[in-house]
Image: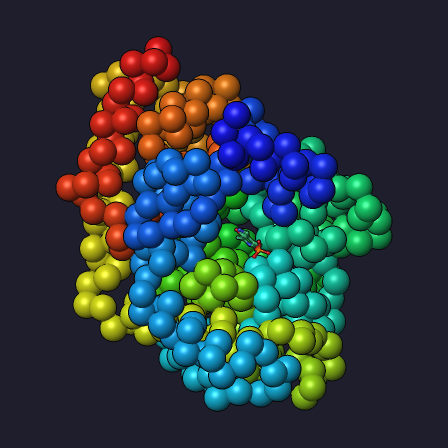
Amino acid sequence: MSRSEELFRQAVELIPGGVNSPVRAYGNVHEIPRFIASADGPYISDVDGNTYVDFIGSWGPMILGNNDKRILNSVAEAAGKGLSFGAATEAEVEMAKLVCDLVPSIEMVRMVNSGTEAVMSAIRVARGFTGRNKIVKFMGCYHGHSDAMLVKAGSGVMTAGIPDSAGVPAGCTQDTLSAEYNNLDSVQELFDRYTEEIAAVIVEPVGANMGVVLPEKGFLEGLRAICDKYGSLLIFDEVITGFRLSIQGAQGYFGVQPDLTTFGKIIGAGMPVGAYGGRKEIMKLVSPVGKVYQAGTLSGNPVAMAAGLTQLKILRDTPDFYENLNANGDWFYTEMDQILTDHQIPHCLNHIGSLGCVFFTEETVRDYVSAKTSDTVVYAKYFKYLLNHGVYMAPSQFEAMFLSGAHTRERELKKTLEVIDACCSELK
Ligand code: PMP
């Protein structure tokens, strides 16, 4: 028995499902989860000594590659001065200044500890600012596990929120409305019906939690226009896209400015961090100056701030970082698409810059319903083959894969394409 299997057997008795976050259980691909021992650059290694090319990168934050020495040094230095003070620090001011300087739509920002917290707080602020209760979200977009966001809403646009999890009272989701991604009419219908009740529209500017789904031309601009017309706030959940598509995130990439933005793990470079921010007139509502309460003992933690500051400064100061990363992404995903086409495997490969995902379907994937047409049995086979041949992809169809600045075309990406090529022969 492998050490991973041994640990998993112990873990399932001690931790629900053996894991501290569901996707890690590999339940969708019916495989024993690999327990990770370490990671370095574009590689990740498990407790049995297997090393894989890492296309998860802790689900986004390791954009420079794993175990970057510059970040580790700043963490060690900060840790040497104390792990947490529960008090204001200079690093928090520096972080706030950096985020406000880098992202034009943000004039004021608050640090929290996860993407979930960032979204939960941004929604509270949007409600406080507008004096309205309803929130529009999109089917297939994930915004963390706060009560109001746990809505499946698979049964049509006008469905009032039905909780997607036990333990969520219907009252918590009654103000959550669901629309279809890439369908402005579905949003307009909600505004026609709830004209002056909608506080905000929250969207992943690139869908990355139903696999990768790109916004079609005019979709984000259309959301901006609808929100302006009805006095609602537009929230971009940039937990995945922030500081990844560009130094200004998706909003810089697409040139559409939200009122509020949520960020997550990438700001902490692997330490637990989230953040939300926006225009001053909105953010001034947050406690202690404003009437919207939000707090956190570990928020702005000095070690996490040190890690994040180092990473963000490297991203800002490395010439052509995003051009190179996105060009590598374009090259890699185009090659991957071609290999699948050459093998006549029905698929839809969606990608943007370093983010990408293959769906095993004949349909063009542009929303939740089309994403669900993917053959998850084929995905599981694909995943297993790659894992057994040294390539670590998302253990679920409905997740993104992430390239980092440490992945090179000559080595890791080429090797991965060879494995995918061999895998295709097996899939047929
Ligand atoms: N929003 C988006 C877009 C996400 O992808 C995620 C998680 N990956 C979250 C929010 C929640 O973040 P966290 O897991 O840090 O709570």
- Left or right side of 243 for 200: right
What residue sits 58% from the left and 62% below the top?
Answer: 114
Q: Nearer the viewer, residue 379 or 207?
A: 379
Q: Nearer the viewer, residue 157 or 395?
A: 395
What residue sits 38% from the left and 75% below the top?
Answer: 74
Ligand 1's image quarter is bottom right
* Residue 363 place in picture, x, y as percent: 43, 24
Q: Nearer the viewer, residue 385 or 143?
A: 385
- Left or right side of 414 for 64: right
What residue sits 47% from the left and 66% below the top?
Answer: 268
Q: Quadrant of the C terminus?
A: top left
* Residue 208 place in picture, x, y as percent: 47, 45
Q: Is residue 320 above or below residue 167?
A: below
Q: Nearer the viewer, residue 399 or 284?
A: 399
Q: Is residue 198 above or below residue 141?
A: below
Q: Is residue 116 above or below residue 366?
A: below
Residue 288 is drawn in which quadrant? Answer: bottom right
Q: Residue furthest top?
A: 428
Does residue 412 appear in this view?
A: yes
How does the figure colour the protein chain or chains?
Answer: rainbow
What residue sits 53% from the left and 47% below the top?
Answer: 184
Does residue 119 appear in this view?
A: no
* Residue 281 place in picture, x, y as percent: 58, 83
How many numbered marks are there?
A: 0
* Residue 331 place in picture, x, y as percent: 21, 41
